[in-house]
Image: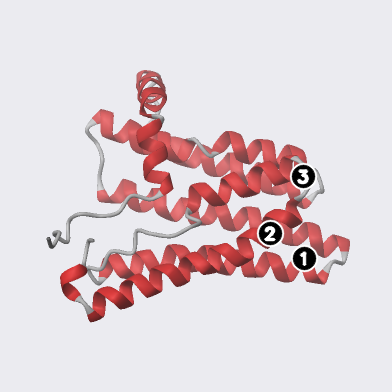
């Protein structure tokens, strides 16, 4: 039976929001009562990630990983806060999405500076490949959405990338994370490209 185009597949990030709704909603209510605007929460997350990236660049990998791990939930909280306030908007979603990209690229910038200081050219290449894959994962979905395709699939979406990167930073093993990200982020982008290609050739399967 054909399914409608409106039905979208859920990513791991989507499932995390569902699984942790019991925690996110009370926290969002608490921060809303403090008078914190959702966009401020978004910027606080970016600020925390920036500190983490600076620590990584200076060689404090464990502390950088801890800061990044702490600020990851801000990404879910800002949207939940906006929803509970009845203020969810396209502008808020846009700001959130753009900030997410800056946050990830700041972390890669921190790693790049760290490895440049170490003189490790191979690790720098891995950082580039991981960052390129991350950007392409985001871009393929955004472009697919603009053309009315569904590319909401993939092995390594944003939540999974942080779950790979932050623990490896804390354990002082970022090179392991970079190998995983360099390979699987680009594979995820390829998954989305192939999904859109399939829908383009078989329009009746959109949203399945």
- For image coordinates 35% across by 38% down, the residue present is 79
Asked if one can make out residue 149 in the rendered structure from this viewpoint, the answer is yes
Question: Which sits earlier in the primary sequence, circle 2 or circle 3?
Answer: 3
Question: Which sits earlier in the primary sequence, circle 2 or circle 1?
Answer: 1
Asked if one can make out residue 39 in the rendered structure from this viewpoint, the answer is no
Q: In the rendered structure, find residue 75 and report the number of the disc placed on it.
A: none
Quarter of the figure with the N terminus? bottom left
Q: Is residue 106 above or below residue 206?
A: above
Dot 2 alpha-carbon crowd within 10 angstroms: few under 14, some 14 to 19, many 20 or more: many
Instruction: Tell me where residue 113 sits by quadrant.
Output: bottom right
Q: Is residue 189 above or below residue 162?
A: below
Q: In the rendered structure, find residue 123 and report the number of the disc placed on it.
A: 1
Q: Residue 53 location in percent, x, y?
A: 68, 48
> Is 32 situated left or right of 201 in this image?
right
The answer to which of 77 and 193 lies nearer the viewer is 193
Quarter of the figure with the C terminus? bottom left
Query: Do callouts 2 and 1 mark residues in contact (Cβ within 8 Å)?
Result: yes
Display coloring:
secondary structure
- For image coordinates 77% across by 49% down, the residue present is 173
Q: Which residue is mark 2?
A: 178
> Is 7 situated left or right of 193 in this image?
left
Instruction: Tell me where residue 61 sits by quadrant.
Output: top right
Q: Residue 171 location in percent, x, y?
A: 76, 41
Q: Which residue is mark 3?
A: 61
Question: Which sits earlier in the primary sequence, circle 1 or circle 3?
Answer: 3
Q: CA distance from mark 1 to mark 3?
A: 15 Å
């Amino acid at each position: 039976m054909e399914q409608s185009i409106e039905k979208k597949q859920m990513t791991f990030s989507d499932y995390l929001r569902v699984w942790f709704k019991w925690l996110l909603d009370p926290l969002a209510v608490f921060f809303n009562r403090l008078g914190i605007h959702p966009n401020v929460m978004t910027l606080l997350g970016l600020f925390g990630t920036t500190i983490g990236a600076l620590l990584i660049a200076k060689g404090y990998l464990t502390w950088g990983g801890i800061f990044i791990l702490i600020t990851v939930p801000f990404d879910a909280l800002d949207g939940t806060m906006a929803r509970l306030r009845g203020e969810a908007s396209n502008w808020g979603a846009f700001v959130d999405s753009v900030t997410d990209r800056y946050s990830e690229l700041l972390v890669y910038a921190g790693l790049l500076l760290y490895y440049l200081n170490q003189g490790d050219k191979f690790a720098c290449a891995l950082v580039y490949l991981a960052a390129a894959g991350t950007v392409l994962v985001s871009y393929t979905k955004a472009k697919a959405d603009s053309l009315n395709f569904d590319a909401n699939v993939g092995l390594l979406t944003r939540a999974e990338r942080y779950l790979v990167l932050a623990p490896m930073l804390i354990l002082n093993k970022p090179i392991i994370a970079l190998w995983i990200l360099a390979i699987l982020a680009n594979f995820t982008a390829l998954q989305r490209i192939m999904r859109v290609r399939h829908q383009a050739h078989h329009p009746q399967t959109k949203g399945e």
